């Protein structure tokens, strides 16, 4: 990742800022599409088998034959979690452990009541990854250190790098038994949106490159590949705005 890419993203943000405030109808349309795309791709990365159209229907409260109850709840919960993130942005609430636990509680609502919003009590391995998360007994201390890092050193980073590293460092700790991936992407977008960037979607088609870049960052401390992947996704997230504004 180099400064040139950050400069390009800053220029795209400045261009979009010139159009603000956007027409409410454009905002509504873009928001509807974002919630659907973000929910579908984030859940699909984790193995949810609902298609894009099925995700839309599930979020409307309609049951789809042949799909599990959990998959339906994952769609509904993720939509509600996005709305919670947007509320945090609107209220300018800082990232803290309480917000993270509340977000995770929404992600696992009606799925795993015992573990929703609670740090894990067991040691875990991440399937297919070389990185081993810390032992359960270390999680509270590491999460406290994570928040302190966010409040201090992370504030000196470009917002896109900060968002990528928040995602990466959070999932490196793997503080919950389940739902860490979805929660980490929600946190990444919280950071982006707090800085005036559009929320971005890591697409399911990127899953292998995404996991490999994360594992490299966790095992070597080299975040360059992962930051580049996030930066490219952020660049792509401007495209719906240009289309809606007639710039494409």
Image: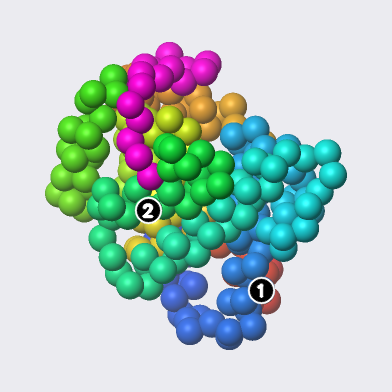
Give residue 135's position: percent from left, percent from top. 28, 19
| Residue where numbered disc 2 is placed | 102
- Residue 186 seen in the current view: no
Residue 104 vs residue 27, the one in the foreground: 104
Residue 121 sits in quarter = top left
51 to 33, vertically: above or below: above
Task: Name the outermost residue toward the right.
Answer: 65
Q: Is residue 116 magenta?
A: no
SS at mark 1? helix
Q: What stretch is highlighted in magenta?
A: 117-134
| Residue where numbered disc 1 is placed | 29
Verify CB contact (< 8 Å) between mark 1 and mark 2.
no
Residue drawn at x 73%, y 55% as measured from the top left: 58
Residue drawn at x 61%, y 42% as measured from the top left: 43
SS at mark 2? helix
Residue 170 vs residue 161, the one in the foreground: 170
Give residue 174's position: percent from left, percent from top. 37, 30
The image quadrant where one finds the N terminus is top left
Give residue 183's position: percent from left, percent from top. 45, 44
Q: How would you rate the neighbour count of disc 2 (Cα within 10 Å): few for under 14, some for 14-19, many for 20 or more?
A: some
Give residue 37's position: percent from left, percent from top. 65, 54
Q: Earlier in the sequence, mark 1 or mark 2?
A: 1
- Residue 65 seen in the current view: yes
187 to 129, vertically: above or below: below
Residue drawn at x 44%, y 66% as measured from the top left: 86
Residue 77 vs residue 24, the one in the foreground: 77
């Amino acid at each position: 990742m180099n400064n040139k890419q950050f400069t390009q993203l800053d220029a795209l943000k400045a261009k979009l800022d010139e159009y603000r405030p956007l027409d409410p109808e454009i905002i509504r349309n873009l928001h509807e599409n974002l919630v659907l795309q973000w929910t579908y791709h984030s859940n699909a990365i984790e193995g949810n088998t609902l298609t894009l159209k099925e995700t839309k229907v599930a979020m409307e409260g309609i049951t789809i034959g042949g799909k599990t109850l959990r998959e339906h709840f994952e769609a509904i919960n993720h939509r509600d979690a996005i709305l919670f993130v947007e509320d945090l942005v609107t209220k300018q609430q800082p990232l803290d452990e309480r917000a993270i636990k509340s977000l995770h509680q929404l992600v696992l609502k009606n799925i795993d009541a015992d573990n929703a919003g609670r740090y894990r009590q067991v040691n875990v391995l991440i399937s297919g990854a070389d990185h081993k998360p810390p032992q359960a007994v270390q999680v509270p201390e590491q999460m406290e250190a994570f928040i302190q890092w966010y409040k201090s050193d992370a504030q000196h980073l470009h917002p896109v790098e900060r968002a990528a590293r928040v995602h990466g460092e959070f999932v490196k700790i793997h503080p919950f038994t389940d739902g860490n991936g979805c929660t980490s992407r929600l946190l990444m977008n919280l950071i982006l949106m707090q800085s005036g960037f559009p929320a971005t979607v890591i697409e399911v088609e990127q899953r292998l490159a995404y996991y490999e870049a994360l594992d490299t960052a966790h095992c070597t401390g080299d975040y360059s590949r992962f930051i580049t992947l996030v930066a490219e996704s952020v660049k792509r997230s401007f495209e719906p705005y240009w289309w809606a504004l007639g710039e494409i």
